[in-house]
Amino acid sequence: MTEGNGKLMTCGVDEAGRGPVIGPMVVSIVCGNPEELMGIGARDSKALSPQSREKLFHKITEISRFYSIRIITASELNSLMDRINLNRIEEEAYSGLIAKSPMDCEYYVDSFDVDEGRLSKLLSERTGKKVVCKHKADSLFPAVSAASILSKVTRDSEIEKLKQRYGDLGSGYPADPVTREFIISSLRQGRDISDIIRTHWKTYRDLLGESKKTTLF
């Protein structure tokens, strides 16, 4: 799609926080001109420093024609995963953002399904819009790069809020030793972390078992 000024418009959707055992998953959509988004330096959020992402976050929200951010908390994920899996949760979140976008253009998605074609067909049918799903789309399409930045900055901000409330809980990712120690310590102390922990994650179940072990000296 092109606007009245002849500029090409595309939309991109991406998430941050699919894998962590602590904190929210964030899904964002950004619609704008690819050249403008590239011009401000939008690229895969993983290739940028936190400071660069923060600066780009504000630039993206200023120049994009439409954007929206969906925060799915850990407790919401727990509730949803009582009946559906993580891919289904993402399908619903992505569909919701795409469906409410007013832009009549192509929508690019960083595919969370191993079958790109299957997901493209599903999201297109659910939203009535042309959706193209690609692996590593955050490094291929500026609008997806921009969406990845909004998601990453928003999740980082949410994690900082949790740290102010609960103390240092690390990054929230399963491989992070600080995160693992925080969970074990909280469980052993009987501390209520139910609002921030993803109870369906194998990591949580493993650490729950670990917390019940006693060390003999």
Image (cartoon, grey):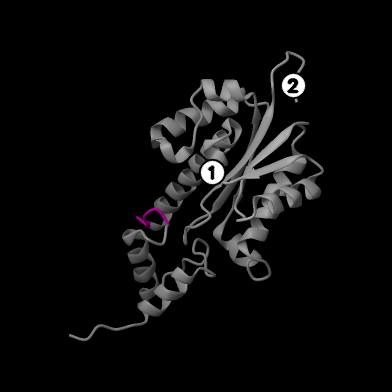
Q: Residue furthest left?
A: 217
- Image quadrant where residue 108 sits: top right
Q: In the image, residue 14 lies at what x, y percent?
A: 59, 43
Secondary element under disc 1, as helix, strand or loop, is: loop
Q: Residue at x 60, y 61 (%)?
A: 77
Q: Residue at x 52, y 69 (%)?
A: 199
Q: Residue furthest top?
A: 5
Secondary element under disc 2, as helix, strand or loop, is: loop
- Image quadrant where residue 38 sits: top right
160 lies above or below 45: below
Is 130 situated left or right of 50 in this image?
A: right
Q: Which mark is first along the chain, 1 or 2?
A: 2
Q: Quadrant of the N terminus?
A: top right
Tag count in the figure? Answer: 2
Q: In the image, residue 170 lies at what x, y percent?
A: 36, 55
User: Looking at numbered disc 2 in the image, what kind of residue is underneath it?
Assistant: Thr
Residue at numbered disc 2: 2
Residue 66 visible: no
Which region of the structure is painted magenta? 167-172
82 lies above or below 162: below
Residue at numbered disc 1: 136
User: Looking at numbered disc 1 in the image, what kind of residue is underneath it?
Assistant: Lys
Q: CA distance from mark 2 to mark 1?
A: 25 Å
Q: In the image, residue 116 lies at what x, y percent?
A: 65, 50
